[in-house]
Amino acid sequence: MLFAVALAVVLAAQTLSAQEAGAAQEPRDPDIAVEPEKDPHTSEAERLQDRLETLGGRRQEFESRIRQASGEDRLVLERQNWQLQLETHATIRGLAANLLRQESEGRDVTAPKQELTHGLERRYPSYPRLIDRRLKRLTELRTERDAATGSDVNEFERRLTEEENRLQILYRSMLEILVVMDSLGLDVEPWRADAAKRVTARAETLAGRIEVFRTKQKDLTKRLTESPDDAALQDQLEIIAERLKRSTDNLSATVALMAKLDLERAQYQQLLIQATGEITADILDSEVALGLLGQWRDQALEQVATRGPSWLVKLLFLVLILAAFRVLAAITRRIVSRSVGASRLNLSRLLQETLVSWSSRIVMAIGFLVALGQLGIQIGPLLAGLGIAGFVLGFALQDSLSNFAAGAMILIYRPFDVGDVIEAAGIAGKVSRMSLVSTTILTFDNQTLIVPNNKIWGDVIRNVTAQTIRRVDLVFGIGYADDVEHAESVFRDVVAKHEKVLADPKPTVKLHALGESSVDFIVRPWCRKEDYWDVYWDLTREVKLRFDREGISIPFPQRDVHVFAESSSQNETDR
């Protein structure tokens, strides 16, 4: 069984590639044997040893088949053999952990431990060779990919991704075996230094590729903005983005390996943050954060030095354009204000204010777009973004938009205007201000009420002052004993003598109803709308004075009470 341990270690450290398939096998020593123990730890160690021996046999079988295969069959066998290698590494780690656990519990595992360490020590140098071969294979694949066209490019990209993943796993396996060797007591410092050198070289290569891809991506993006319908440029940009992502993923895994080796990695962490735009926990490292700040500062200073003068000129043009359009907006506002004020269309105050304000705003909006165009900003995407933002805000501000729509209906149909006395939404008063969102009403007791337009438009609107003349409706009652014709002549005389009562339309004085306590007359003169209350109050006062002088009564509600008294004889009979 001890021989099985040595054999499995040797097989686990060998490469899966066809180039190493002919490596010599260690001779079996028939004199070495390990008796099985009943202890659970020992049983587990035996199971792992048996597993290593089985994996070694399968790998020899696959390597033999790989030498004879070609094309797609060879690729399939290599993938299966690669899985066997990963399983072998995991079994080695498990066996080493089991032996160390038994040793910590006082058991004698000297022989299997020595065999394991001896095998690892002799075969660990194969890892650098395996890595070099993978790197060489990646270079060959990239050369073949660059010469390929059409769908073959995608196939090479897939194979490159697979090879780079294997290479990354190979780096990680190398470090894991180093950890196992270190735990078994071997002096791994020389190998650790070589591994650190190789991992650092890997990080430098990936960093260089990332910089190249970022530069290409920026160039393609710029060209695509100039020719957005170029399908070839779009395909190239997608390929570069995929390569950049693959390189950043590999660099991220390599940085994790550098952390295990305690290597300096701040610059690569900074590059990852810049390339991916993802803020990770690495930003908490003071060295990384300071490095990023320093790079941003240098980039800002470089931009100022190289583009500062041109940006200064553009900024000056921006200020001049905005100032010119501001003056033009003021002139436009003045012209529109005079036009709507002198118009014969009799526009409402709200419509006038809306036209005046929007005329200047439209001019300023055009000026703002022209200014942005001078800065090199694309107006089309900006307008599209504003359209999407407006659509989203429309859902968020549904109530405000309903007020706006109601204000537009008021503007179009003009049921009232500023200065009119209205009754709407249960409120009566004089309109003091109007906008597309709300209407400000000043009540008769001098309270200012701001009413949303949808409340007004959704209710009955009564415009008291919409017409130039109004009818004053008065009702007067006289007693049943009074002279009806005399009272009617008094009403007509009072109305005819009031200077603010209009002769046309003719006032109406009629006996209207016979009430419970009075004979009621209606008196309905006409007057200008601004004289309504003067006529109302004056006529009411004058009628009372004339009634008093003429002896005409103004009755009040009264009832007749009839009392019936019974005779005393009837009362006696009832008793």
Image (cartoon, rainbow, N blue to C red):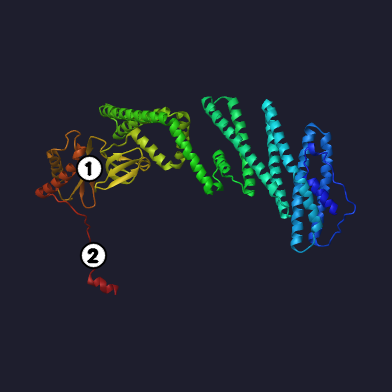
Residue at 37% x, 35% y: name it. 409
Q: Nearer the viewer, mark 1 or mark 2?
A: 1
x, y percentage for residue 401? 41, 39
Quarter holding residue 219: top right
x, y percentage for residue 42? 80, 59
Tell me the kind of residue under disc 1: Asp
Quarter holding residue 238: top right
Tell me the kind of residue under disc 2: Phe
Looking at the rendered structure, the secondary structure element under dot 2 is: loop
Looking at the rendered structure, the secondary structure element under dot 1 is: loop
The answer to which of 556 and 118 lies nearer the viewer is 118
The answer to which of 178 and 280 lies nearer the viewer is 178
- Tell me the crowding category of disc 2: few under 14, some 14 to 19, or many 20 or more residues within 10 angstroms, Cα based: few
Picture quarter with the N terminus: bottom right
Residue furthest to the left in view is 549
Please tell me the numbered disc located at residue 473. Answer: 1
Residue 537 appears in the picture as rendered: yes
For marks 1 and 2 on the same chain, the one whose residue lies earlier in the sequence: 1
x, y percentage for residue 365? 38, 31
Residue holding disc 2: 564
Image check: 208 left or right of 166? Answer: left
Task: Work out whether 187 lies above or below 383.
Answer: below
